[in-house]
Amino acid sequence: MVTTKINIKPHLKEYLVGRWNNFDEKTPVQFPNRLDIYHLIWDLMTKRPVNCQIDSGNLEIVLPERGGIKDPRYYNYLSIKSNVV
């Protein structure tokens, strides 16, 4: 399991943790693979740039694993451009 941290608005974080984690903020949020957000995150994952610092944010999420095409050990970066979607 590979995770990353993202910054989102506090009320959205509260909703996601409540909806998908039963209000458990200690474990990362994992979206079921039948949801559009799972596939959207997978599409947005890119290789981490060499000069990029470790992720920080208020929400930790589990990155999707869909076979060997995009291995989350290497494709584990959601850039600023991901916020546009």
Image (tube, rainbow, N blue to C red):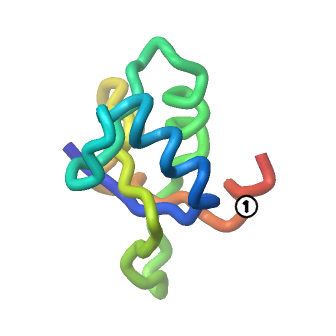
Image spot of residue 2 (x, y percent): 25, 49
Q: Nearer the viewer, residue 39 or 11?
A: 11
Asked if residue 56 is positioned above or below residue 15 in the image, the reply reads below
Q: Nearer the viewer, residue 79 or 5?
A: 5
Q: How many marks?
A: 1
Q: Residue at x 41, y 62 (%)?
A: 5
Q: Which residue is mark 1?
A: 81
Image spot of residue 64 (x, y percent): 38, 35
Image check: 75 left or right of 68?
right
Image check: 18 left or right of 80?
left
Asked if residue 78 is positioned above or below residue 18 in the image, the reply reads below
Most distant residue in the right direction: 84
Q: Residue at x 73, y 61 (%)?
A: 81
Q: Residue at x 54, y 27 (%)?
A: 39
Q: Quadrant of the N terminus?
A: top left
| Neighbour tally class for label 1: few under 14, some 14-19, many 20 plus, Cα within 10 Å | few
Image spot of residue 50 (x, y percent): 43, 81
Q: Quadrant of the C terminus?
A: top right
Asked if residue 54 is positioned above or below residue 30 in the image, the reply reads below
Q: Nearer the viewer, residue 76 or 19?
A: 19
Image spot of residue 61 (x, y percent): 38, 48
> What amino acid is found at the position of numbered circle 1 in the picture?
Lys
Q: Residue at x 37, y 43 (%)?
A: 63
Image check: 68 left or right of 35?
left
Please tell me whether mark 1 sits on a helix, a strand or a loop: helix
Most distant residue in the top direction: 34
